[in-house]
Image (tube, grey):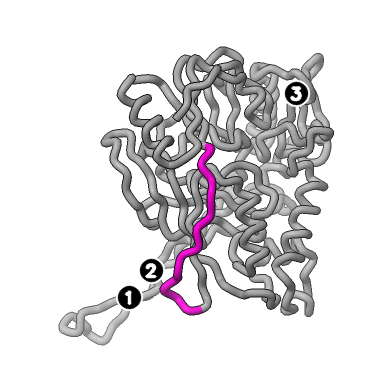
């Protein structure tokens, strides 16, 4: 590891806010990262790790602690125990979209719909990154991580990470602390090895996004075509980083799509886009032979939760694309109502003021309090 002169977080985050922290370390390998974390924990510093800076909203005052930049990268091919599958182990500091490009180039399917998402691989499981119906939990096998409480490195299966909609036991939720304070060192994914052959796109959200409707929904399409279309769509929404486009100076979707019980969703206007969240049910009922009396109780009806579009809620609460508060340098993206953008020199205070205004409008109109998606450092909403 190397201690460096602290760099302002405004230069290292896509929202372009934040002063230089008290201390900054660069970790260019996994051993460096482990050493940096153990050293920081031994000092008793406040700390956080910084990857691509695309999911971080930092305050205007200097962070009184240590920021560790995760710069270790690399992809390792591993054998898969399943026929027609392939595994890759990826270092935490590897660029996420570079990984997606690698998998598409090598005919490995499962994360192509997540093309263009900024950030690093190590951050992906923390918030169970996803797009257009694909989520990392569908391909994640395990992570290698180091726990703050013990300083020990271990390999943890995906089933123990509490993966849910944009969450995990590792995520720092606004107003709370992670259930498990740990840092990911590497990620192992299991992907379908389809080679150069096309495949039928599964998942309604992804098919709709790609325009694969009717008979076209059953056509096989190349992975490279899917990636190209997703990158085009993200660019049109201002979700691909571009230094010449202020709409991309954002943390992506600033608010999470709301997950609400079905009765709550039914109270919203019918035109509000919504998607059922499949309940976690055990489809197999095991009855010991000695206890079977010829009667099987009917499976109880479980209403699924519903995901509703935060972008629709924002626009229909009167916040249009491009909206700004008077004299503010923060604004809603001109391309996507869910992205808050730094239009040039905006402070964290200006962005937070805009976020609070949007929350208040949506809550007043629809009774839902939108939750921020980025990790907030020294910022209050």
Q: Is residue 16 above or below residue 252?
A: above
Disc 3, SS: strand
Q: Answer whether labels 1 and 3 touch (C-beta < 8 Å).
A: no
Q: 30 or 175, which is in the foreground?
A: 30
Give the Cα separation between the discs numbered 1 and 3: 54 Å
In the picture of the structure, the residue carrying the numbered disc 2 is 282
Q: Which residues are magenta?
A: 71-83
Q: Answer whether labels 2 and 1 touch (C-beta < 8 Å).
A: yes
Please provide percent x and percent y for residue 302.
Answer: 45, 63
Residue 260 visible in the displayed image: no
Give the Cα separation between the discs numbered 3 and 2: 47 Å
What label does residue 330 carry, if any?
3
In the picture of the structure, the residue carrying the numbered disc 1 is 285
* Residue drawn at the location 71% of the way across and 50% of the way down: 272
Q: Quadrant of residue 179?
A: top left
Q: Residue furthest bottom?
A: 294
* Residue drawn at the location 65% of the way across and 36% of the way down: 254
- Residue 77 is one of the magenta-drawn residues: yes
Q: Is residue 62 above or below residue 131?
A: above
In which quadrant will I find the C terminus?
A: top right
């Amino acid at each position: 590891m190397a201690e460096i002169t602290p760099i302002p977080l405004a230069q290292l985050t896509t929202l372009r806010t934040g002063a230089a922290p008290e201390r900054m370390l660069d970790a260019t390998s996994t051993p460096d990262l482990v050493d940096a974390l153990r050293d920081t924990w031994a000092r008793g510093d406040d700390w956080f790790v910084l990857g691509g800076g695309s999911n971080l909203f930092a305050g205007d005052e200097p962070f009184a602690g240590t920021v560790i930049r995760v710069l270790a990268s690399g992809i390792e091919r591993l054998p898969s125990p399943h026929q027609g599958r392939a595994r890759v182990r990826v270092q935490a500091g590897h660029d996420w979209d570079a990984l997606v490009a690698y998998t598409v180039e090598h005919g490995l399917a499962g994360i192509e719909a997540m093309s263009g998402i900024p950030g690093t691989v190590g951050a992906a499981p923390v918030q169970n990154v996803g797009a257009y119906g694909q989520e990392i939990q569908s391909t994640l096998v395990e992570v290698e991580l180091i726990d703050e409480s013990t300083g020990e490195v271990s390999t943890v299966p995906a089933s123990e990470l509490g993966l849910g909609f944009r969450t995990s036991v590792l995520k720092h939720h606004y107003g709370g602390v992670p259930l498990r304070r740990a840092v990911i060192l590497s990620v192992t994914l299991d992907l379908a090895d389809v080679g150069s052959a096309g495949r039928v796109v599964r998942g309604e959200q992804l098919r709709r996004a790609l325009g694969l409707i009717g008979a076209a929904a059953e056509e096989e399409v190349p992975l490279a075509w899917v990636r190209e279309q997703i990158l085009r769509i993200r660019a049109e929404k201002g979700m691909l980083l571009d230094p010449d486009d202020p709409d991309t100076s954002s943390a992506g979707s600033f608010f999470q799509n709301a997950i609400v019980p079905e009765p709550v969703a039914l109270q919203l206007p019918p035109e509000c886009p919504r998607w059922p969240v499949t309940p976690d049910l055990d489809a197999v009922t095991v009855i010991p032979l000695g206890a079977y009396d010829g009667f099987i109780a009917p499976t109880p009806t479980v209403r699924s939760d519903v995901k509703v579009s935060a972008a629709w809620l924002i626009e229909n609460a009167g916040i249009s694309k491009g909206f700004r508060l008077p004299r503010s340098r923060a604004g809603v993206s001109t391309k996507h109502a869910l992205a808050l953008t730094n239009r040039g020199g905006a402070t964290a205070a200006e962005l937070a003021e805009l976020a609070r205004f949007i929350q208040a409008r949506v809550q007043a109109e629809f009774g839902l309090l939108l939750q921020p998606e980025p990790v907030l450092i020294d910022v209050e909403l």
